Image (cartoon, coloured by chain):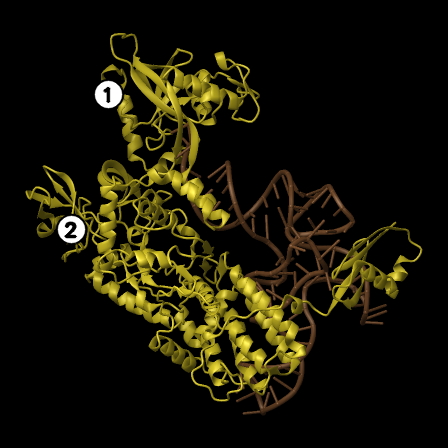
Amino acid sequence: MNNYNFTAIEKKWQKYWEDNKTFRAEIDKTKPKFFALIEFPYPSGQGLHAGHPRPYTAMDIIARKRRMQGYNVLFPIGWDAFGLPTENYAIKNKIHPKKITADNIARFTEQCKSFGWSFDWEREVDTTNPDYYRWTQWLFIQFFKNGLAYKKEMAVNWCTECKVVLANEEVIQGECERCHGEVVRKVKSQWMLKITEYAQQLIDGLEDVDYPERIKYSQINWIGRSTGAEVDFTARAVGDISTDEDVLRVFTTRPDTLFGATYMVIAPEHPYIEKWADSLENIEEIRQYAEKAARKSDFERSEIVKEKSGVRLVGVNAVNPVTEKEIPIFISDYVLMSYGTGAIMAVPGHDQRDWEFAKKFDLPIVEVVKGGDIEKEAYTDVEEGVMVNSGFLNDLDVPEAKQKIKKWLKENNKGKSKINYKLRDWVFSRQRYWGEPIPMIWCEKCGWIPVPEEELPLTLPEVDNYMPAENGESPLSTLESFINTTCPVCKSPAKRETDTMPQWAGSSWYYLRYADPLNQNEFVSKEALEYWLPVDWYNGGMEHTTLHLLYSRFWHKFLFGIDKVNTPEPYLKRTAHGMILGEDSQKMSKSRGNTVDPNILAAEYGADSIRLYEMFIGDFEKTATWNTAGIKGCKRFLDRTFGLADILRGHESREYSDSLKGAMHRTIKKVSEDIEQMKFNTAIAAMMSLINEIYDNGSINCAELKDFLILLSPFAPHICSEMYEMLGFGDGVESETGDLKQVHDEKWLDFDPELCVFDEVEVVLQINGKIKGRLTIESGADKKALLAAAKENEAFCAALLGKEIVKEIVVPDKLVNIVIK
RNA sequence: GCCGGUGUGUCGGAAUGGCAGACGAGACGGACUCAAAAUCCGUUGUGGGCAACCACGUGUGGGUUCAAGUCCCACCACCGGCACCA
């Protein structure tokens, strides 16, 4: 058998698809639409790597199948092109990032096209194109106008290497996600987006979408809802009744344990510390502790997890609102200013951290819930346990006590029920060049004013040096011509914001732009929106679950709220693929030298072989280890597919032959169902089994080969198109020559469930669960017939002879098991 | 520490509670060839036996069941996420 000439074939069909705009998507209301989305790539200088083709081929298979099922498919591609690596490369090589980006996109485009993915290339978007980021800026202004973008002085994560502010989510174990530089805390004025306002909606919305449980679960955990109560304690200087009482508010999930609160702890950054400075005898010690805590990154703060540290505020005490006893106040870095109110009531009997702290500082531990041994550890069980030492709460169980104390707090104006979220607002400012300029103007008289929408895009100006300024500000801050402007409201001199947006900005709404990428008047037209949205199926990486996926859901919910989009959720269905590791089972990286260039392999084995291999490598949802040797099996399978032409018996047959009919129907069923569940590996295995059976059969007829090509075409579209044309398949299968007939114009195949079953099945005969023989019988035989047939089996009978039968288990088409004594 | 996931031949991996190892890779033997590659045929979990066959076998230990890779309990290892969240 000759190997097929994949180089020529793949070029030919790629050119055909491009010339004929085969995969162009246009609104057609006579057809159901299907919006298939992949995570658009960051066009890095390294080019496509082995990880890209896996998710892209997977969605391509689904998109191609949907087209054959009669859907009008939108399957777009674009470039998430702002970002640090490009900027760092620009700084190092003194090349404009725009130029680098253009080169990278050109390279990526060529590489993507050589895999034959059925993208609509006319809808390409590029987040760095002013026609695109004009609308990213416009969207920011909508956030601002609706009170969801605000500036805030805050301690931020500062990467000492990149000299840039990072979002909490970009800090990995105290290191910068990108450069692994040390991250410390630094106070800066930052633009923030109020994602917290959507915390509840982001949780609730998950009920209506088809996401895997593990994704819903991580998003819910990330948002971190907890229900409890805010309780107002009072605090005042010791022995000085003339001073005013201050209200020290805490958040607690255990208001039922209020009688056990024997001290309080506030965060080192708590504003009351300076307010109370005059009353505090040890203010210097307190300030020193606070300063030390501030210098530590969150990582370092959490590293000292075993040993609790803190300083007592000498001179100010608090009063527990129910016991009315005076209790001490401490500062400690285990209390975070960013969560709750920055202050806690400490209940050492029933919270392990408080318990450890109390042991260290020798503070009273009071049992208020019976059930544990608080000498040894805190008793935290809320399920069973009865209140004690708790005044009017005594003898209630925990849930009852929670209800009663909340009522009491409300009636006595000492607090109220409260829901808290771990989710924090999104730091949206970057002091970098290669990002969308934030379209805001600072006017001494009018405050922050957005750039008038008709002046958008606010384009990135040319600079000589892309390096952030030494003080950490954006390179734009050194550009007088950019900074100086006039206030759009009062026309007096004003200054522009010099921060740019984070990379997540452009990717938070790109799926919307795909619906209407060339629109110059709106970010997307109503008509396009109503036809194409929401996205029907979005596949991407697990690593974006709590970042990109949550951010874009937030933007979408905001837009839904101001009536700019028509659905509450952007994505109906989300799936996640596993990563591809290098041959050494390590994450692929240039420094490890274990990267794989899929284009080099495609040149050697053919794009269809690589597509197939990446789908065959293992369970799509799990990480997989690359093994170049494994491609051979897929290449052989395609060679054998091409060889089917040699054993084709004429062009007459319109129906499957008796010898292959069952196998054909079974494979159609298996492949159809497996694609829907993204079990591509077993779908391919089924087709391999079928081809083995065809070769065992010795020949194939025209109906069988044509349908085999239809089935395989989403996986290996080039070879299938070629054979389809070569063999003259199409409307009339008898044609010998054929015009350019395209396999993807065919209808996807149906199967007959009745024909999927085998005529005969082998049934296992067991005695006490041990296999004693096998029996071939027509499939579907009922229990009685099966048992009777089993008892006629000689070896089986012999084993049963003279034994007492206790039980007979018969499973049709599977087994007969007889339990004997 | 907490949460989630995974653990099956030499390797990648299959198995609605019903014949473990589909499919592929690799290896070995053979055919073709001057030879090699490619291709084709066969063998390939472990131990025992000339054989048909027998015993054992899905991280470890227990349990449920006529029947467990699959369900339950405890543990171990690895991978990923989170890091005192009141």
Query: Residue A793's spot in the image, x, y percent?
Result: 86, 65
Q: Secondary structure at mark 1?
A: helix
Chain for numbered disc 1: A
Q: Residue at x 37, y 59 (%)?
A: A532
Instruction: Name the amino acid type tagged 1.
Output: Lys
Disc ID at residue A30: none
Q: For this view, does A658 lie left or right of residue A59? A: right
- Can you see residue A429? no
Disc ID at residue A275: 1
Q: For this view, does A747 lie left or right of residue A546? A: right
Q: Residue at x 39, y 11 (%)?
A: A324
Q: Secondary structure at mark 2?
A: helix
Query: Residue A355's spot in the image, x, y percent?
Result: 46, 23
Of residues A769 and A646, the one nearer the viewer is: A646
Rendered hue of chain B is: brown
On the image, numbered disc 2 is attached to which residue?
A476
The chain that appears yellow in the image is A
